[in-house]
Amino acid sequence: MKTLKYLLATMLLLGVCNLTHSQKLSLGIFPEPQEVTISSQTYAPPHGYALRGINNPDADAVRLLKEALPFAKSGKSLPLEIKKLKDKAPEMQRSGAYTLTITKKGITIGIVDDNSLFYAAQTLKQLVKYDEGKKILPLCSIKDYPDVLFRGTVEGFYGQPWSHADRIEQIRFYGRIKLNTYIYGPKDDPYHRTPHWRKPYPEQEGERISQLVDRAKQNEVIFYWAVHPGVDIRWNEEDRSLLLQKLESVYRLGVRGFAVFFDDISGEGTKADKQAELLNYIDEHFVQAKEDVAPLIMCPTIYNRGWMWKDEGYTTALGEKLNQNIQIMWTGDQVVTTIDRGTLDFINPQFKRKSFIWWNYPVSDYVTDHMLLGPVYGNGLDIKDDVSAFVSNPMEHAEASKIALYGVADYTWNMEKYDSAASWKHALRAMMPAHAGYLETFAAHNSDPGPSGLNFRRDESAAIRPFLSALSDTYREKRTIDEAAYRQVAEECRKIVRSADVLLASGNENPALLKETAPWLHQFKLVGEYGQEVLKLITLLQQKEKFMESYTHLQALQILMYRTDTSYNQSCYRPGGKSGSKHLLPAFNALFETAVKRYNELYGTRLDTRAVYLPYTLESDVEQLAPLAMIREWNNVGISPADAVVDWQAGGSLTVSIEGADVLSAVWVDLGDIRAADFRLEVSPDGQEWRTVEMKPSENDTLLKAEPGDGKLLKVRLSNVSGVTKQVDLKMFRLTRR
């Protein structure tokens, strides 16, 4: 009873209360702590602090503490005591768990390990505020620990790699938001994969790896180096020995975490028994032989449920044959998807261990013409006990990826209290404090990857979508303008144009982010201007001259959007820059088309009603091919890769139409392991008469080349003539213009 009275009296004295999620974020505590009791009062320490407690605390954590707090050089001081945690609860014995108590008499930090002290210091640094130049602290008590033990990123995307400076900055950022894992596996590093995975790094490249390791140690991040030998590995003693030598050479660079990737390969390297034998050998003769190396990680060849048809026994074999301490990566039910309870209930029993989640978000290598800047959501909030780790595969845009990584950090630290919207807004404020509102407008309309063979979509333009729908539906069905919706959409267009201008001019606040997003910001402004002009157009049906002025302007904006799309970000995967493509542009285009059709009906004119300027169009009766985008790169025009196995029915075809016709020097086709005789390529100068063009093997085993000859062509068609459905890996369908 006395204890209860004492606690009540103390809480009343301090004005202590449990704050809501949004309140905590406004105080800067990120990621969301597990338990917080914080006073409404603030406290200005009258003296500097002096370290007490354990000997030789982590130097990097102490550095953070000294950045956050005044420290006494002599004379009077307040104690900052660091001590071992006595709480025996399993979660409070986890690496990174800590307690933090701030009173007027001093600060006490309870820790499990160096990670604990580092994270407590990061929290303390966020709690410090300023009042007239003085540092102010809240009186509080925090009990905190991560839900997921290993949290971070895997640099495993295709496309433009991060620079060394990007990686250094990323690791510093991970320390700040309490991510503790970085897996180095860039596809472009020839010493990570074919052709030089067997060779040690040259001196300069090796020095860069060592620098990354050092930066990781400073930020309590485990640096994992991954090797990708599966493309050309020979299952013999020589290659096994060379692999061990390579790992040893990387170990000498300071690396203490290792991974072996067998993803995105074919042939002999895909066999589960061979992979397991090799990995067990590495585990027993290298990892376990070292006392300071983290558990081995492997990425399997079949790394998602959608591919299990390729080898139904593969995942079970790995689970049975791999040493228990080897971690197995998994992307979920598909290559790109969210992770939930059902996913883990399915795969964990097969792996006979908790899955190491490789989450393919916000990676955009399959939709490089889109920026993925939206909130992190959709993953289960009840899976913390069923995963061994959770790492995100980011975009090639390192700085822009941070928006999503804030969400990943918050989610993996405290799943139960995770609030995706609040976490996202915190990220935007952290990225550009002075321009957060403008960045939010931009990010809200640049969140969805667009259509692709992977069928992964994200919410976009959520706040304005009901008004876009109301305006479009009313105008189309009732031939009237919903005035309330019109005003909302008009205001959003003004915000879009204003936000694009302000962000493009704000290079001093976050120049790295501006450099990465500039192509999309230019397109974003055009989308806003296009929307403004469309809104004007639908009010001008009775004013022929003004309608034509608006119509001409809109055609010009359509061409400018096309030119922007084909001038910037000309990636070899899916070049261009799309903005507002899920809801904004479709709504504006629908309004444009409806208005022009009515104008034609009213005045007997034949104005072009097409809203999108694109000289190439794709038509297909194959369900998975129909939504694919047309892409253009220099003299090449093609279809974006399907990124998934396509069920191409007998007689099914795809047809590319060329506006105004064009001369083609070549047509390139790559259908994976499909016989050329099963498909027929035809060309037509007029869409009526067709002739077959022979497809011949070219640069590799699956790439076929056809030469249509001289003369302009209007259409190109590829058809399944095998008589049966074919499972096709559509890697390429490309036209090369002469």
Image (spheres, rainbow, N blue to C red):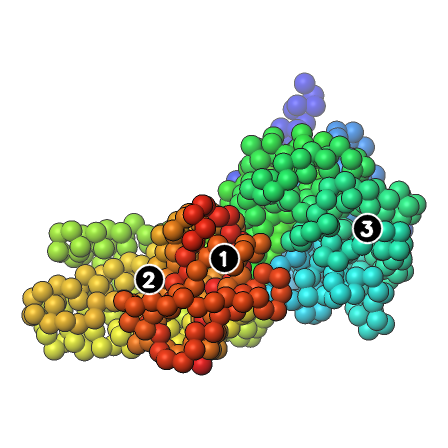
Q: Nearer the viewer, mark 1 or mark 3?
A: 1
Disc 1 to disc 3: CB gap under 8 Å: no
Q: Which amino acid does label 2 sit on?
A: Leu
Which quadrant of the figure has residue 39? top right
* 691 is higher (above) or lower (below) than 90: below
* Residue drawn at the location 75% of the way across and 29% of the way down: 89
SS for dot 2: helix
Which residue bears the numbered disc 2? Answer: 585
Taking the image as shown, residue 32 lies to the left or right of residue 224, namely left
x, y percent for residue 183: 72, 54
The x, y position of residue 130, in whole percent, is 62, 59
Q: Nearer the viewer, mark 2 or mark 1?
A: 1
Does residue 670 appear in this view? yes
- Crowding at dot 3, Cα within 10 Å, few <14 / some 14-19 / many 20+, comes out as some
Q: Distance between the residues labelled 1 and 3?
A: 34 Å
Identify whether 305 is placed above or below 239.
Answer: above
Q: Which of 227 and 141 is in front in this view?
A: 227
Q: In which quarter of the image is the C terminus?
A: bottom left
- Which comes before the other along the chain, label 2 or label 1? 2
Three-letter residue code for mark 3: Trp
Disc 2 from disc 1: Cα separation: 41 Å
Left of 186 or right of it: where is 447? left
Pinpoint residue 273: horizontal percent, then vertical percent. Answer: 77, 40
- The residue that disc 3 covers is 235
Residue 677: image tag: 1
Kind of residue at badge 1:
Ala
